[in-house]
Image: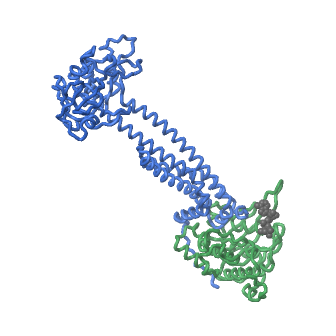
Chain colours: A blue, B green
Amino acid sequence: MNATLPPIASSPRRGIDVFEALRGALSALSANLLRSILTALGIFIGVAAVIATVAVGEGARRQVLAQIQSLGANLLIVWGGSATMGGVRLGAGGRSNLSWDDAAAIAREISEVQVAAGSIRQTFQVVAGNQNWSTTVLATEPDYFTAHEWIADGGRLFSPEEAAGGRKVVILGATVAEMLFAEDDPVGREIRIRQTPFEVIGVMARKGQNPMGQDQDDTVFVPYWTARRSVMGASRANARQVGVISVKVHEGENMAAAEEAIRTLMRQRHRVAANEPDSVSIRNLSDIQATRDASARTLSALLASVAAVSLLVGGIGVMNIMLVSVTERTREIGLRLAIGARRRDVLAQFLLEAVMLALLGGAAGVLAGMALSHILADVAGWPVLVRADAVLIAVGVSALTGLFFGFWPARRAAHLDPITALRHE
Amino acid sequence: MRHKRPAEGGFSEAMTALIETQGLTKHYPAGEGVVAALQDVSLSIAPGRFVAAMGPSGSGKSTFLNLIGCLDRPTRGSYRLMGEEVEALSHDRLADLRSRRLGFVFQSFNLLPRADALANVELPLIYRGMPRRQRRERAAAALAAVGLADRMHHRPTQLSGGQQQRVAIARAIVGSPDLILADEPTGALDTRTGLSIMALFQALNRSGVGILMVTHDADVARFAERVLRFRDGRLIADETQNAADAATALVALPEADAVA
Ligand SMILES: Nc1ncnc2c1ncn2[C@@H]1O[C@H](COP(=O)(O)OP(=O)(O)OP(=O)(O)O)[C@@H](O)[C@H]1O
Ligand SMILES: [Mg+2]
């Protein structure tokens, strides 16, 4: 028998081959397949739940953001009535203390302001041919559309002459146009508001719901002075009254400064005594956004704690099973140390197993979470958005969980005494 | 290529020693006091020898073997492996020595149950960072050298005890060690299979590999050319002998003993 093997050329010892290490870890995990799956389940469920809920939350956030943006950027809404009145919305029927001249003064005297447009609204039946529809009539001026960044989809907006001169023209919101004229083009046709005929000169682009859930397209727009004379005017005590003033602040100007200037101006104009509360309240759309963001943050914090708890539980599961595995494989560890494995080789072997276990659970969790998001989108019709960074973070955190909870068992394995380990039953 | 030198005994091998110990002592804690598992062992073994360590149970044979195998550190005394003082070495350096210089064979084989014969034999080479192809070739050659060329893809459970021990021996020689350390390598085998393992050891030894084998069986120790006798942790005798030839003994074995 020739038992001679060629000598091995003495080369500096290299690290152990990564492919071999991965294969070893996979084979160790698949040797106890059911156990590995059950262990990874904790991390799987946590990650899947987080991916799905984050997708739903993100979808909802995007939707709200789009709604808020639909109102127009740099927009301030000035309401008549002080904050102590609870910011109650005063429609045409209420006693707003704002007037057409207040709007003009804001536009004229405050440098930050680009446009300021007063408007007043009231609900009427509008009739076109044999169709009728109950909707909001909004009496305003062309600057209103500038302030709300709203354009006509068909036809045109009011001309300054029409706004000032009392001509009976109307612009329809997209919903009203659809209700009264269905597929037909309403431009040039006639509608009646309180028996008064109006010529349709335009149809507004569709804007959708506002953040309060109202359909902004269920409105018709009439020049202010026309409305006051022929529709709303007769019964009004104050013929120059407006319900709200829409203010657009110049791009880049400080919104808070503009807001403060408006408050001060209104106090002067309304002769409010120094110890009295403000005569107006001002809504900033970024306030609404901030409120939404705050509730979104609360939700995110809640999600993050759910994720943290599930990863903690999953991680403890990983640690537990790795400790069991180290005990079961004590002899194997002893053998590996005896035939030349260094401590760090053994450490790496068990760490890799723990990380793979957590990572596979996390990756499967990501897939399940994405599937769940799509199901929610398709079946429940929720707007969902799976963000790439959420996926990356979930996978990264799973791997870190494996690393963290796998470290102690792996260290225990690496520091076993080879002789004791080899004798282990 | 190494060449077999004529056997010479005693303490005269210091200059060319593979192994050299001075007052090697190992104490283990036991309850209040200590057990002196090994006491004051001084000896020297030249490269390429076949040495057996004998003695009754608890006499310190395994303790001695583990110290020589760099698996354990002595309480006192010095140990040089190929001129290198072992006490001073770090864990990593010891692991390195084990992987380059030594090969282990155990009574209970200690094969990885999930890996086939080839993968088991490859294992030490993985820790030496050898590329896969080279590793496979060497492992296959080592398996061929122990007569298992046709069993490379069998798992340990698909092999007989003797075959498993051959795989373990292939694993021990795959890294071209200077010394094979074997603790009761025939302890779990029947007489015939044990003899065939001894024949394999002698063949390996003829090709230049040193062997240090622990046994309590005089029938096994007779195949070594030098016998160390231990009692109560002390080396009480160190004799050279004319080794019996295992291959001849195997042929001479009565058919009746051949129990598969
Ligand atoms: N890890 C240990 N802790 C405590 N005592 C030990 C340890 N290892 C060995 N001993 C003791 O050291 C002595 C020598 O043990 P060793 O294993 O070397 O004997 P041995 O000659 O190999 O015996 P056997 O033939 O039964 O294997 C024994 O008394 C044993 O109890
Ligand atoms: Mg022993």
Quadrant in which the C terminus of chain B is drawn: bottom right
Q: Is residue B11 visible?
A: no
Name the one closer to the observer, A290 or A403: A290
Name the one closer to the observer, A152 or A199: A199
Residue A15 quadrant: bottom right
Task: From the viewer's perspective, tell me whether residue A215 is left or right of residue A367.
Answer: left
- Residue A325 in the image, given as x and y percentages of width and height: 65, 58
Task: From the viewer's perspective, tell me whether residue A302 is left or right of residue A105.
Answer: right
The structure residue drawn at horizontal position 73% and vertical position 64%, both measured from the top left corner, is A423
Q: How many marks?
A: 0
Name the one closer to the observer, A44 or B156: A44
The structure residue drawn at horizontal position 25% and vertical position 39%, both measured from the top left corner, is A182
Name the one closer to the observer, A277 or A233: A233
Residue A86 quadrant: top left
- Residue A47 in the image, given as x and y percentages of width and height: 52, 49
The structure residue drawn at horizontal position 76% and vertical position 86%, both measured from the top left corner, is B249
Is A176 rendered above or below residue B154? above
Q: Is residue A373 visible?
A: yes
- Residue B137 in the image, given as x and y percentages of width and height: 55, 76
Is A130 rendered above or below residue B104? above
Is A341 rendered above or below residue B198? above
- Residue B119 in the image, given as x and y percentages of width and height: 59, 71
Is B134 rendered above or below residue A286? below
Residue A235 quadrant: top left
Ligand 1, image quadrant it occupies: bottom right
- Which residue is farthest front? A130
Task: From the viewer's perspective, tell me whether residue A73 is left or right of residue A32.
Answer: left
Quadrant in which the N terminus of chain B is drawn: bottom right
